[in-house]
Image: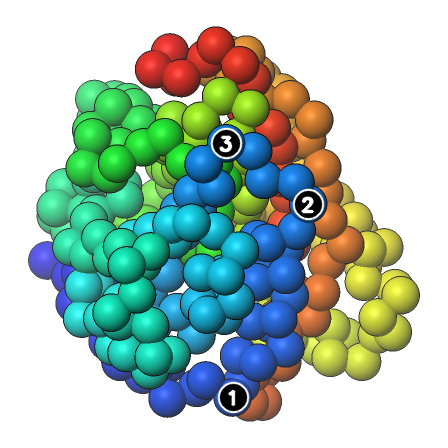
């Protein structure tokens, strides 16, 4: 039996002391989340917040009236808020213990030889928006996912491996489910922001050496060639927003932001971000 819950808790415990290593990445993420006009009641929701090492919580609380942090690991959220001295802030709301796939228990029973029925693929797509969203006080004016999609897809890779005959279908179902959840949580004319690590220097050593100005071209080339982290290829994300009937009618104005490099100890990550506006009149119909 796989244990995605325990694995996530271990990952958070291992990265808890890496505040300094997150500094440049944290500035990028927090600046992106606070940028531009924010409509409505100025409520921010961040999925996959974990230890909050990639979030400047005091700055975000100064920008938004409410900041909601969501993660499977409740302890990580509490410790992260405590580290930044905002535990008692009335605008901060922590939502721990939430499985943002709605399917971790089923996935825990998967193996490389397991037969994955169509019903479980359908659940991966539909349950996040239909069931997980009910556990959160939506709608929010801005909803963000911060390097979470790669972790969710990584759970499938750990459980069944990329040679499983349905691996590609599983990854696409996970991605669609996550994108639909983001749009379901956002208020009409609110905004969705998806941030993801897409490749590391372990697999593309050139990433650590290329000039900053060359990063967009490098990302475009790697997107065409493949070899990115499962589930986060920008071309696939654009296609899902364009072709999935629910996403296509729910969002508009897709924007891809300049990628950046995140150096963490001896590893460098390439990070991609996109945002889009949620169309008026679609809340509850996604």
Q: Can residue 69 be seen here? A: no
Q: Which residue is mark 2?
A: 36
SS at mark 1 in the image: helix
**Picture quadrant where residue 211 is located:** bottom right
Find residue 153 and report its horizontal and vertical position in percent.
39, 49
**Picture quadrant where residue 154 is located:** bottom left
Examine the rendered structure and indicate whether residue 90 appears above or below residue 142.
below
SS at mark 2 in the image: loop
Mark 1: give few (<14), some (14-19) or many (20+) Cα within 10 Å.
Answer: few
Label placed on residue 20? 1
> Residue 36 versus residue 6: which sits nearer the camera?
36
Label placed on residue 5? none
Q: Name the residue at 45% across, 60% down.
A: 61
User: Is 185 placed left or right of 189 in the picture?
Assistant: left
Mark 2: give few (<14), some (14-19) or many (20+) Cα within 10 Å.
Answer: few
What distance separates the C-alpha of mark 3 from that of mark 1?
34 Å
Mark 3: give few (<14), some (14-19) or many (20+) Cα within 10 Å.
Answer: few
Mark 2 or mark 1, which is nearer the start of the sequence? 1
> Residue 111 versus residue 181: which sits nearer the camera?
181
Q: Nearer the viewer, mark 1 or mark 2?
A: 2
Q: Name the residue at 66% across, 51% down.
A: 35
Find residue 114 and report its horizontal and vertical position in percent.
19, 42
Examine the rendered structure and indicate whether residue 242 appears above or below residue 142.
above
Examine the rendered structure and indicate whether residue 10 appears above or below residue 17.
above
Q: Which residue is mark 3?
A: 40
Q: Nearer the viewer, mark 3 or mark 2?
A: 3
């Amino acid at each position: 039996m796989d244990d995605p819950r325990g694995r996530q808790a271990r990952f958070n415990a291992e990265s808890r002391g890496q505040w300094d290593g997150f500094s440049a990445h944290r500035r990028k993420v927090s600046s992106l989340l606070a940028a531009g006009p924010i409509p409505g009641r100025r409520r921010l929701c961040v999925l996959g917040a974990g230890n909050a090492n990639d979030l400047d919580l005091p700055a975000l609380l100064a920008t938004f009236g409410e900041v909601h942090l969501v993660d499977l690991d409740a302890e990580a959220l509490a410790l992260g808020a405590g580290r930044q001295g905002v535990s008692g802030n009335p605008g901060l709301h922590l939502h721990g213990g939430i499985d943002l796939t709605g399917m971790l228990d089923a996935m825990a029973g998967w193996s490389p030889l397991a037969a994955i029925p169509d019903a479980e693929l359908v659940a991966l797509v539909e349950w996040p928006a239909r069931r997980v969203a009910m556990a959160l006080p939506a709608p929010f004016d801005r909803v963000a996912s911060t390097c979470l999609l790669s972790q969710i897809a990584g759970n499938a890779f750990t459980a069944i491996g990329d040679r499983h005959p349905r691996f590609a279908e599983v990854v696409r179902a996970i991605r669609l489910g996550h994108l639909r959840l983001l749009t379901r949580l956002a208020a009409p004319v609110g905004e969705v922001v998806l941030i993801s690590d897409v490749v590391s220097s372990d697999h593309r050593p050139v990433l650590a050496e290329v000039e900053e100005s060359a990063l967009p071209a490098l990302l475009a080339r790697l997107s065409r060639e493949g070899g990115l982290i499962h589930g986060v290829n920008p071309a696939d994300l654009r296609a899902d927003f364009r072709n999935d009937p629910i996403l296509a009618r729910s969002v508009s104005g897709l924007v891809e932001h300049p990628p950046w490099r995140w150096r963490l100890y001896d590893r460098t990550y390439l990070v991609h971000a996109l945002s889009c506006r949620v169309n008026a009149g679609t809340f509850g119909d996604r």
